[in-house]
Image (cartoon, rainbow, N blue to C red):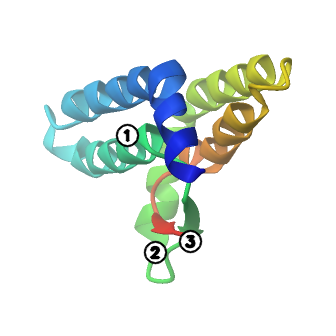
């Protein structure tokens, strides 16, 4: 069932979201100081491409640098990306068939809001 949901997700939403996150990651790699954000973007892109069967957890070794980076991310991009996921999740939840995809968008909210200090692990 997970594979079927992931394939449908890939067709209806995942490919474009992963492409957007990958493009943002490439832009972040242009400057040396934003490389950690680029790495986070590529990690989120992989998760956005195939979200069913994975979950987001906090990394126990994340420290002050991750917290400060998350504040910068939140101000620059996190709020807007999160609002996009919330709106897309609500739009998918309007139909009964789209509810799993809406839930997948809601699963992406925490990692898109504050990506540093988190990791994506299989369930």
Residue 76 in view (yes/no): no
Q: Residues within 10 Å of mark 3 (few under 14, many from 20)?
A: few
Tell me: residue 104, above or below residue 12.
Answer: below
| Residue behind mark 1 | 45
Q: Residues within 10 Å of mark 1 (few under 14, many from 20)?
A: many
In this rendering, position of residue 91 left or right of residue 50 = right
Labels in figure, total: 3
Residue 10 in view (yes/no): yes
Query: Which SS class for mark 3?
Result: strand
Instruction: Report how far apart the C-alphas of labels 1 and 2 lie in the structure.
Output: 21 Å
Front in this rendered view, residue 81 or 99: 99
| Residue behind mark 2 | 62
Instruction: Report how far apart the C-alphas of labels 3 and 1 lie in the structure.
Output: 18 Å
Looking at the picture, how far across and down is residue 80, in whole percent?
60, 23
Front in this rendered view, residue 115 or 120: 120
Tell me, yes or no, whether the two marked residues, 1 and 2, touch with CB atoms within 8 Å: no
Q: Residue at x 63, y 22 (%)?
A: 84
Label whose residue precedes the other's in the sequence (1 or 2): 1
Instruction: Report how far apart the C-alphas of labels 3 and 2 lie in the structure.
Output: 8 Å
Looking at the picture, how far across and down is residue 86, in whole percent?
73, 28
Tell me, yes or no, whether the two marked residues, 3 and 2, touch with CB atoms within 8 Å: yes
In this rendering, position of residue 19 left or right of residue 94 = left
Q: Quadrant of the C terminus?
A: bottom right
Q: Residues within 10 Å of mark 2 (few under 14, many from 20)?
A: few
Looking at the picture, how far across and down is residue 115, in whole percent?
49, 52
Residue extending farthest bottom: 60
In this rendering, position of residue 103 left or right of residue 31 = right
| Residue behind mark 3 | 58
């Amino acid at each position: 069932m997970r594979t079927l949901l992931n394939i449908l997700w890939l067709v209806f939403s995942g490919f474009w979201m992963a492409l957007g996150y990958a493009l943002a990651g490439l832009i972040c790699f242009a400057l040396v100081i934003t490389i950690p954000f680029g790495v986070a973007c590529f990690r989120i892109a992989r998760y956005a491409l195939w979200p069913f069967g994975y979950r987001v957890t906090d990394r126990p070794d994340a420290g002050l640098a991750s917290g400060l980076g998350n504040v910068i991310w939140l101000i620059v991009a996190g709020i807007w990306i999160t609002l996009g996921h919330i709106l897309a999740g609500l739009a998918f939840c309007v139909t009964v068939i789209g509810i799993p995809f809406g839930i997948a968008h809601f699963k992406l909210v925490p990692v898109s809001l504050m990506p540093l200090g988190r990791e994506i692990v299989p369930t």
